[in-house]
Image (cartoon, rainbow, N blue to C red):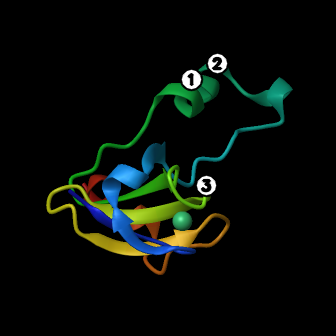
Amino acid sequence: MLRIKCPWCGVRDQTEFHFGGESHISRPGPAEEVSDAEWAEYMFYRKNPKGIHYERWLHAYGCQQWFNVARDTVTHEIHEVYKMGESPLSSPKQSKDDAE
Ligand SMILES: [Zn+2]
């Protein structure tokens, strides 16, 4: 079980949280200039790196706040927790998936 440090509440068990998928996904636009392929990429395609993954979590049974986590998908070690709208100290583009 993961132990996740909510930026507002501190360290709690994973059972208090809901996983929200990949972080740092921007909606393409303006809509009239977005191709079907770009829209499909935005809607359906997500990274699945072996290494650091930047993901959103909701503290559902706590403060109800969303935040970001940089987690290693191999070891499950959490490298960083940061609030929505903030940037990670490490770059999301430095995951092993992007480097290969
Ligand atoms: Zn919380």
Q: Mark 3 points at which residue?
A: 64
Asked if the residues shown at circle 2 and circle 1 are in contact, with their CB atoms under 8 angstroms apart, the answer is yes
Q: Disc 2 designates what residue?
A: 36
User: On the image, numbered disc 1 is attached to which residue?
Assistant: 40
Residue in view at x 58 percent, y 73 percent: 87
Among numbered discs 3 and 2, the one appearing first in the sequence: 2
Residues under numbered marks 3 and 2 in contact, where contact means CB atoms less than 8 Å apart: no
Q: Nearer the viewer, mark 2 or mark 1?
A: 1
Q: Decide if residue 66 is on the left or right side of residue 21.
A: right
Disc number lying in front (3 or 2): 3
- Which residue shows up at 25% across the image and 60% down it? 2
Quarter of the image with the C terminus is bottom left
- Identify the amino acid type marked 1: Ala
* Distance from the alpha carbon under mark 3 to that under mark 2: 34 Å
Tell me the residue at 56%/54% (across/down). Answer: 24
Residue type beneath disc 3 = Gln
The mark nearer the N terminus, 3 or 1, is 1
Disc 2 element: helix
Q: Residues within 10 Å of mark 3 (few under 14, many from 20)?
A: some
